[in-house]
Amino acid sequence: MPFKNAGKTPRQIGRELGVAYILDGSVRRSDDRVRIAAHLIRVSDQSQLWSESYDRYLKDILELQSEVARAVAARIIVVVSRERSERADHPIAPEAYDAYLRGRFFWNQRHPDAVANAVSHFERAIAGNANYARAYAGLADCHSVLSEFGIGAVAPVDAMPKAKAAALKALQIDPGLLVATLYYGRSYDRSIAEARQLLELDPRFVMAHINLGRALVQKRKYALAIEILRTATALSDNSIAAVTALGQAYACAVRKSDVRAKLALLTRLERKKYVSSFARAPLYTALGDRDRAFECLAGARDERCDFLVYMSSEPAADSLRDDPRWHELIPVPGKKNEPYLADKALA
């Protein structure tokens, strides 16, 4: 327990962990009885939202642990749900919530037709509740996904203004929708654990397979990563994101003939739909071919590929960062990047 006796405030701990709430507690024993005290603290203002004490006999410690865990979890759900509902300007109608859930179901399939179907569901949810922040967020996710190199249904210059407008509307209603990504934070063990939990709930969740495979590549568990990413390509009918991730895993495992096969597959897919230049960059990077990797990144910049914004924290791109071309092509978060923002279409 790294924070025990560390002398840090809840706000400091929350900032380090990237969480909005902290569960604090203590255990005291007296003869054959034990008292467990739990406190739920909101990080933003360090206020105590809920506290409870549990006095039990110590006859069965395992049963005691389960009982207290269930009780604490139940109370947290109630308190946090109440906190979130109090932020909402209006209650969500059951029909709108149903449309939102259906939208998320189709969005998670990551297929152009399914994502287009998701758009209609999110729009229906918004029509029923104009202040439904999560529906606007879902709409933004759809427009973004339709244009990203992994789907390739719509060019970014056409889709991203719609995604931006929906995202800004969602954050205007509920700023708490901002989230962090474990992979880009290089928390690979946590990223792996999260992906596996998602796959327990839905073994056919393509993005969970892709995220798991990419994190395993960073842990240098190439054989397992390749197995996982093969599953992703099969489930997604060779989605560009899955093909690229698998090709990168092959490159890291020094299976060059398999990498060439994936590059050839991307060329064949390009005859049928939009394939961003970005898709080939990770493969050439993993192969150590800097010139071709930067050619791909330059093409992605000209296409206004949305994935360039992730490159500043992409672990797989570390070998490119000392090249002068990197600073000319890669946008820096929070800083105006003229080569990337020259086209005013996204303004």
Image: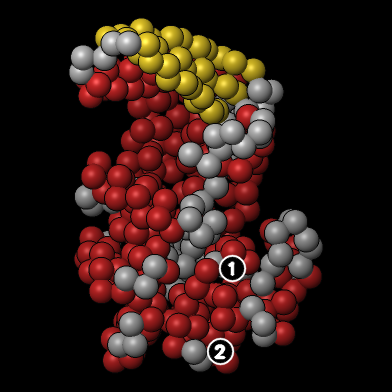
Instruction: Please state if 229 lies on the left or on the right of 76 as rendered.
Output: left
Quarter location, residue 17? top right
Quarter containing the C terminus: bottom right
Q: Residue 330, labelled with which disc?
A: none
* Residue labelled with disc 1: 311
Going 50% across and 33% down the picture, which residue do you hit? 134
Does the rendering let one see residue 311? yes
Which residue type does callout 2 highlight?
Answer: Arg
* Residue 152 screen position, x and y as percent: 44, 66
Going 61% across and 43% down the picture, which residue do you hit? 16
**Is 88 or 33 nearer to us in this picture?**
33
* Residue labelled with disc 2: 290
How crowded pointer 2 is (Cα within 10 Å; few <14, some 14-19, many 20+) is rated as some
* Residue 92 screen position, x and y as percent: 47, 19
> Farthest residue toward the front?
31
First in sequence, mark 2 or 1: give its number: 2
Compared to 169, does 291 lie above or below?
below
* Residue 263 screen position, x and y as percent: 37, 85
* Residue 82 screen position, x and y as percent: 50, 15
Q: Element type at marker 2?
A: helix
Going 54% across and 67% down the picture, which residue do you hit? 314
Quarter location, residue 3? top right
